[in-house]
Image (cartoon, grey):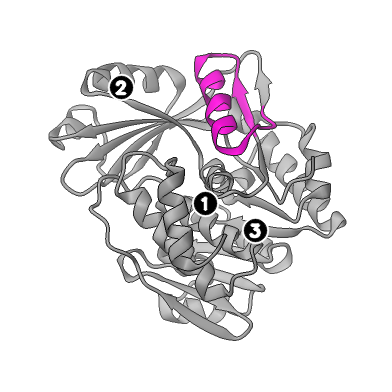
Amino acid sequence: MSYEVVGLGNAIMDALVRIDDDALLGDLGLTRGQMHPVPHERWLEVYQRVHGLGVEIHSGGSCANTISTLGLCGARVIYGGQVGADDFGTQYGRSLTDACGGHALQVHGELPTGKCLSLISAKDGERTMLTDLGAAIHLGKLGSLSAHIREARLFHTTGYKFLGGAVRETAFAALSEAEAAGAKVSFDVADPFVARTIRADVEWIIKDHADIAFLNREEAEIVTGKPVDEAIDELAGWTEIVVVKLGGQGSVVLHGGERYRVPVFPAAVKDTTGAGDTYAGGFLYGWLRGLGAGKCGELGSRLAALTVGQVGAVVRDRSHIAAVKAQVGVA
């Protein structure tokens, strides 16, 4: 089977907990609103402390969220990454199969599945995260994903894959496969930490490899070294389509010398996890179906509004997705 979109990402299981009192974060030694890289043992320690508050488990990671959104919209997609030979790895595969019809995950026999514990403030949906990347960053080969990339219309990945280690070389190999086959490349910077850590690489990937690039306000300012308005002007010349997400101010889509302002849509915010990933999934689905750049942004923004109105990064109610697609006028 050939796929419209092939994704390569860090396979991270999301464990989501809503907290009523932010004082718990101080008790745990955590800084509100930040991502804390931790080893497996520390992750389990905090997880066990908050487990009694009620935990929701979902497959996660920026790329997987985007690919799952595409699959739930109706695109033919497949996702590759690496999990451990554990319960989280099994659940991760099942979640992808539900959204996408299958997956191309590899299994590491010794390392645990990567995981992110998100402590979500009940008052405003702000996330404080603990992340153990586990097996995800030790993916040393493309495996079956190589053939899928060569047949795809679009290859999608994120900046996380280029931070270092074996997975960095695997990500560059995937870019080479896509370009050699004539597939378009979509790249989501995905985190200001990525933009700061490998700024030169991010600029090079967008300019020399990506056809579609997604950044948020902070990432745009970091990679260009300019305030956001000037950053948007500069990014317009970097590649074919650039999307800059501006939080509550909506987003800007740059394409063919045109600039489209896309609003945010009303939502009662419960959890901001994955809103940008869902936006990217909606945008790319619109692109696959031939929508104009502004309409692609509208689809992404409307789906993102559904995401922040729930707990969890991926909207899995296909009836809600169908209703949004109908609003935008796409099948």
Q: In this view, does 165 lie above or below 190?
A: above
Residue occupying the point 64% across, 28% down: 82
The quarter of the picture where the C terminus appears is bottom right
Q: What element carries label 3?
A: strand
> Which of pointers 3 and 1 indicates the residue nearer the eye?
3
Label 2: few (<14), some (14–19) or many (≥20) C-alpha neighbours in 10 Å:
few
Return the x and y of residue 126 as percentages of the image width and height.
Answer: 26, 47
Does label 2 or label 1 sit earlier along the sequence? 2
> Which of pointers 3 and 2 indicates the residue nearer the eye?
3
Return the x and y of residue 178 as percentages of the image width and height.
Answer: 79, 53
- Going by the image, does 240 lie left or right of 99? right
The range drawn in magenta is 81-105
Res. 216 in view: no
Q: How far apart are marks 3 and 1 (CA)?
A: 16 Å
Residue occupying the point 65% across, 58% down: 186
Does label 3 or label 2 sit earlier along the sequence? 2
Amino acid of disc 3? Ser
Amino acid of disc 1? Val
Q: How far apart are marks 2 and 1 (CA)?
A: 25 Å
**Picture quadrant of residue 46:** top left
Return the x and y of residue 128 as percentages of the image width and height.
Answer: 30, 40
Residue marked by disc 3:
186
Count of numbered marks: 3
Q: Which mark is residue 194?
A: 1
**Cβ–Cβ below 8 Å for labels 2 and 1?**
no
**Cβ–Cβ below 8 Å for labels 3 and 2?**
no
Q: Is mark 2 on a helix, strand or loop?
A: helix
Question: Which of these two is toward me, 43 or 157?
Answer: 157
Residue marked by disc 2:
46
- Magenta segment includes 184: no
